[in-house]
């Protein structure tokens, strides 16, 4: 029997966590439905995420719905899970695997089944599902559905025959895909609504109609198999996506583990073309991210993505670490390097117009304060991150500073920032007016940049502010009795933040992380934003103002500390993930909401630029891109860079089905954009700013445009 997890239901000290976790435990995590313990916390060591060496000792606390925590989780089983070849008899060596990490999936939808009605899913991990106190020891939480389990329920709810119509509601409830008896903030509800984000993105990335290429379960043609990772209900990501990266990276690791375990099992059984070095090409589409962060590739979860991709390729040369002798450790030893067969796509983000990015050079004599507006009736916390440029830690370039905070009521607080530690944050409270509770907390630390040199660091300051309105008691004694703390509402209005006492000039990048999902009460989750007199929302004539003009020549439209530049996804700022922007298909203009990248200084080892752009709108009057709804036959349009990301994943899968040896990463996408510009791009398209679209436009993949013989998705829309 697997050894029982050593997880604890109390939060660790701040030394082994991060500001988002600590503040969530104080302000957000106290929300319950009346019964203490409506959610649990799973404590996981860094090595579960593939983080080794000194960071392997880090502890990550992940909140989960009640009963989702697996008390029998065994990290060794997680690392060494073994598949059985007989369960995947239909999987061939040249097949491709598409992994999608998103919200709910309609696992019984016809677009995710072969022509004979059998499922295309190799696995579906429902991260928020109850583990029933008997969870599989290889999973830290939730429940995983196998191909066999899915097909058993398909037959059961199709009168015993896969060709019959499916009772989709019964099927969904039988597999726990919906939670009709739970409140909206705690349960999975999407499949009972008009739209399902996960279903839509999976369809755009890999849905096929029966009878099309790749729809036969067996045969000479290669086929695309699916692995789905359904994230827990949005509340358990944290209102600002606090824990999203942990759920997502565990999902990515699980996708890779399943694929490689199938290869190993097939080789062990002597299956044709499965040699000892066999690997499936894997495309992973992840449709979320967050705005605030270092954006230099140094996030723990970005590092985890890098480690997993390199591990699969036997590439142990980690360009982010050196040992004390200046040599780079090679975790793969002397093993022969493989071709890269792991490709991760993420969206640039949709926050370009949300005023969440600012940049200011701060001199010793002072600077224009950062102004942040907290909106009234905001039911979620706000996080403001300030990141300095890099400097040498041992040079004493930075010694101390003061952060002066002015509240909307005129109250002033001064936070002394002195002798910050490396990685481990110091924290200081922002008290309420009466001094009896706290309305916020300031965390500061030194964080190593993406450089190879250990001495290069950045100052990180995180300001966490309480909601401006809630209908529950924000007390943490029920969660952590040893550190009981009362949190009061933060006043709505204009807050100012000013750094003083610097010895030398430092440039600071600032970002607001707020209400990533606009949940759990979307009508009351209101974003905070930066404000400055120089910021303009519209151009002359009344159209929405973007970061650059769509014209020849290109003109930069931002002027001032509050900027659209640098509004891109902080989790995708790494060369090991492709960052996808979006544009309008009718004339090629970048979507105004599609985030703008930021070319980091030369000493950043990062990828802070959008790589390419794919359609996320058909036209001005044709909103979004069509994809599957939660029921068979339903189609609806959703927009956003997540749709463009799904299209990029489909394009990669299409190529790999023809040649599984192709490396379809960033260079491949950028080459495709340049090729489209030279041949095939409509005459009316212009060259947008590279920070908006990277190397340029990429059109709809052919397999999407002809999703049904003679009548593609885009053509069908004209008949609605």
Image (tube, grey):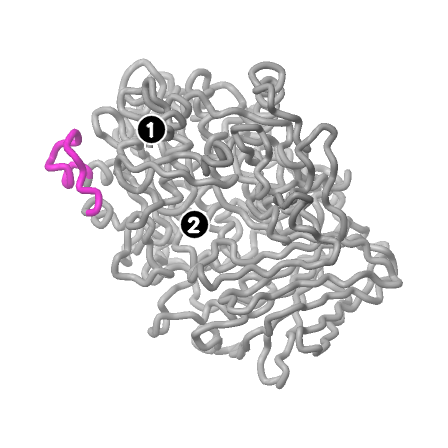
Q: Is residue 431 visible?
A: yes
Q: Are marks 2 and 1 in contact (CB under 8 Å)?
A: no
Q: Which residue is mark 2?
A: 75
| Magenta region | 154-169
Q: Which residue is mark 1?
A: 719
Classify 647 as above or below 387.
above
Sequence order check, earlier mark of 2 and 1: 2
Extreme-front residue of the structure:
541
Front in this rendered view, residue 153 or 596: 596
669 left or right of 238? right
Residue 648, horizontal then vertical, whole percent: 50, 30
Question: Residue at coordinates 61% horizontally, 19% vertically from top-left?
Answer: 677
- Residue 577: image quadrant is top right
Front in this rendered view, residue 347 or 77: 347
Residue 161 highlighted magenta (yes or no): yes
Residue 520 highlighted magenta (yes or no): no
98 left or right of 485? left
Question: Residue at coordinates 62% horizontally, 86% vertically from top-left?
Answer: 434
Front in this rendered view, residue 645 or 6: 645
Crowding near pointer 2: few (<14 within 10 Å), some, many (20+)? many
């Amino acid at each position: 029997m697997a050894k029982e997890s050593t997880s604890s239901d109390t939060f660790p000290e701040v030394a082994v966590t991060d500001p988002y976790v600590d503040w969530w435990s104080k302000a957000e995590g106290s929300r319950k439905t009346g019964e203490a313990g409506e959610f649990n916390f799973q404590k996981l060591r860094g090595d579960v995420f593939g983080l080794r060496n000194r960071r392997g000792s880090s502890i990550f606390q992940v909140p989960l719905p009640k009963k989702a925590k697996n008390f029998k989780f065994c990290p060794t089983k997680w690392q060494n899970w073994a598949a059985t070849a007989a369960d995947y008899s239909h999987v061939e060596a040249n097949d491709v695997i598409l992994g999608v990490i998103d919200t709910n999936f309609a696992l019984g939808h016809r677009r995710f089944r072969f022509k004979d009605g059998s499922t295309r899913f190799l696995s579906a991990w429902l991260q928020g599902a109850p583990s029933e106190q008997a969870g599989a020891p290889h999973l830290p939480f939730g429940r995983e559905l196998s191909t066999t389990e899915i097909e058993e329920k398909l037959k059961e709810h199709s009168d015993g025959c896969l060709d019959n119509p499916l009772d989709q509601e019964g099927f969904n409830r039988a597999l726990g895909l919906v939670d009709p008896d739970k409140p909206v903030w705690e349960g999975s509800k999407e499949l009972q609504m008009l739209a399902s984000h996960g279903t839509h993105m999976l369809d755009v990335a890999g849905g096929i109609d029966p009878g099309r290429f790749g729809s036969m379960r067996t045969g000479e043609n290669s086929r695309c198999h699916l692995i789905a990772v359904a994230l827990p209900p949005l509340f358990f990501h944290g209102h600002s996506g606090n824990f999203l990266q942990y759920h997502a990276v565990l999902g990515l690791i699980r996708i890779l583990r399943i694929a490689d375990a199938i290869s190993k099992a097939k080789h062990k059984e002597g299956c044709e073309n499965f040699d000892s070095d066999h690997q499936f090409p894997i495309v992973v589409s992840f449709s979320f991210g967050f705005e605030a962060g270092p954006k230099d590739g140094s996030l723990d979860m970005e590092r985890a993505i890098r480690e997993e991709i390199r591990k699969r390729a036997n590439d142990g040369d980690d360009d982010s670490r050196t040992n004390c002798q200046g040599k780079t450790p090679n975790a793969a030893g002397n093993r022969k390097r493989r071709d890269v067969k792991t490709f991760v796509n993420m969206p640039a983000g949709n926050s370009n117009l949300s005023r969440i990015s600012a940049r200011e050079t701060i001199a010793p004599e002072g600077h224009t304060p950062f102004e942040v507006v907290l909106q009234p009736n905001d039911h979620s916390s706000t996080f403001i991150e300030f990141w300095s440029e890099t400097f040498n830690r041992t040079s004493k370039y930075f010694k101390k500073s003061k952060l002066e905070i002015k509240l909307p009521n005129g109250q002033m607080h001064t936070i002394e920032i002195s002798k910050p530690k490396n990685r481990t944050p110091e924290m200081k409270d922002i008290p309420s007016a009466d001094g009896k509770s706290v309305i916020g907390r300031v965390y500061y630390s030194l964080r190593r940049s993406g450089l190879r040199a250990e001495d290069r660091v950045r100052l990180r300051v995180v300001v966490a502010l309480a909601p401006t309105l809630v209908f529950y008691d924000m007390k943490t004694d029920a969660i952590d009795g040893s550190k009981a703390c009362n949190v009061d509402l933060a006043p709505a209005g204009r807050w100012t933040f000013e750094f003083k006492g610097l010895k030398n000039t430092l440039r600071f990048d600032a970002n607001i992380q707020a209400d990533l999902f606009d949940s759990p009460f979307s009508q009351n989750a209101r974003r905070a934003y930066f404000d400055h007199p120089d910021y303009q929302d519209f151009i002359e004539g009344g159209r929405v103002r973007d970061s650059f003009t769509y014209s020849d020549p290109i003109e930069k439209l931002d002027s001032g500390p509050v900027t659209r530049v640098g509004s891109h996804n902080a989790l995708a700022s790494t060369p090991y993930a492709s960052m996808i922007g979006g544009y309008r298909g009718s004339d090629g203009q970048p979507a105004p909401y599609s985030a703008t990248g930021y070319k980091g200084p030369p000493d950043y080892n990062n990828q802070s630029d959008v790589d390419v752009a794919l359609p996320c709108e058909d036209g001005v009057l044709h909103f979004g891109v069509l994809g599957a709804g939660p029921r068979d036959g339903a189609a609806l349009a959703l927009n956003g860079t997540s749709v463009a990301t799904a299209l990029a994943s489909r394009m990669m899968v299409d190529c790999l089905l023809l040649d599984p040896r192709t490396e379809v990463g960033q260079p491949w996408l950028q080459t495709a954009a340049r090729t489209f510009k030279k041949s095939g791009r409509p005459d009316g398209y212009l060259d947008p700013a590279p920070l908006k679209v990277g190397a340029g436009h990429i059109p709809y993949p052919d397999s999407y445009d002809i999703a049904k013989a003679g009548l593609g998705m885009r053509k069908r829309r004209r008949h609605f």
